[in-house]
Image (cartoon, rainbow, N blue to C red):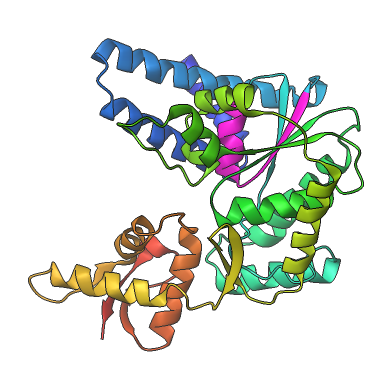
Amino acid sequence: MIMIKYLKRLIGEMTEEEAKSFLLLTMMQLKTVQESNKSPKQMIEDLHNWQEKIISFAQNKERESDRAYNTVHMVCGPSSAGSLKVGLGDENKVIGFLDYFSFGPIYELHKGVGRERRYEWLRNHLNYGDDYIEEDYERQISETLKEIDAIPDSIPIVLWTAENTDEQTGARYLLYLLKAKKNNVYMINTTLAFQELYNTREYQYFFPRTAGVDPEKLYTIYQKKVSNPLTKEERVQFEQEWLTLLETKEVLRVWENNTIKGKTVDYYDKLILTAARKLHAEQREKDFIKSTRLIGKVYGQLDEGIMDTFLEYRVRTLIYNGFFEIKGIPKAMRYYSVKLK
């Protein structure tokens, strides 16, 4: 009972995004354990070790301001940051940039007016919780920018990315934020590094997101795949790519042929409608489909994935445009169902 109360307190002190990240990581850990050929005793031991890692992370957070760091790691996305924090150990500081850059305007994001434009778009289109943008999102972005600015010049920085739009776009933004810093900056592409270390003739892996990789393997990747820091020319190239992106006005981006490409906001709509038709075909009689099931089916068909909050926004838009009937209240995806007209 004492341990349960202690765990409850530690989890209660996490931010909402950290708690969500660890819930996702725990579900992934359970799936890994279930699919392994280990004995029940070893499975229980693995889950116990995972619990210890979560406790260690929460305890480290309590004394974070007093810890000394050898290296700073940066990544976009709270789930990816959570994986790195668990895997890399106390001597490494992880700065996770909260934002997802595959959607939402980034035009003039380096300016206050650009950030406010982005906040307004997210507020008006996505089903976040009450006052999330004002009370959590803006505050955490501001705090992260201050953390980045405070990195001492003597500390090496490792920038993590992967084969997805969020982390590729975010990597360019983070390098732009670091443009005035003299630190050595290293870059690791988690997707490619994992393939180089673990792919075999029998097993071919593709993890499009850093968050999808087991935290212990992230540590191995860090130890084996950090090579030379980015050259001045390479950094300038990434910074210029970010400045080019800043001039685009699309609100949706995809990682395609090693390039970030802008798409129209309805890019996924046909996929959503096709998925709905297939789900209706599985029913004895055409009936309402839980929006969570529809969005999950679409998400599962995407190679790199996009946040379900964006797909839910597109489902609501298709409702407003007359493609779907609705049952329930669309205040969050779990509260309503849809049926094609």
Q: Residue furthest left?
A: 284
Q: Is residue 165 visible?
A: yes
Q: Residue at x 15, y 77 (%)?
A: 286
- Residue 131 in percent (x, y) is at 64, 61
On the rendered structure, is 104 left or right of 335? Answer: right
* Magenta stretch contains residue 78: yes
Q: Nearer the viewer, residue 191 or 126?
A: 191
Q: Nearer the viewer, residue 264 or 239?
A: 239
Q: Residue at x 74, y 61 (%)?
A: 241
Q: Residue at x 43, y 76 (%)?
A: 316
Q: Residue furthest bottom?
A: 322
**Where the N terminus falls, by quadrant?**
top left
- Residue 283 in percent (x, y) is at 12, 69
**Where the C terminus falls, by quadrant?**
bottom left
* Magenta stretch contains residue 333: no
In the rendered view, tell whether residue 21 sits above or below residue 252: above
On the rendered structure, is 230 left or right of 127? Answer: right
In the rendered view, tell whether residue 97 sits above or below residue 227: below
Q: Quadrant of residue 297?
A: bottom left
- Residue 96 in percent (x, y) is at 68, 41
- Residue 20 in percent (x, y) is at 51, 43
In the rendered view, tell whether residue 281 sits above or below residue 82: below
Q: Which residues are magenta?
A: 71-87
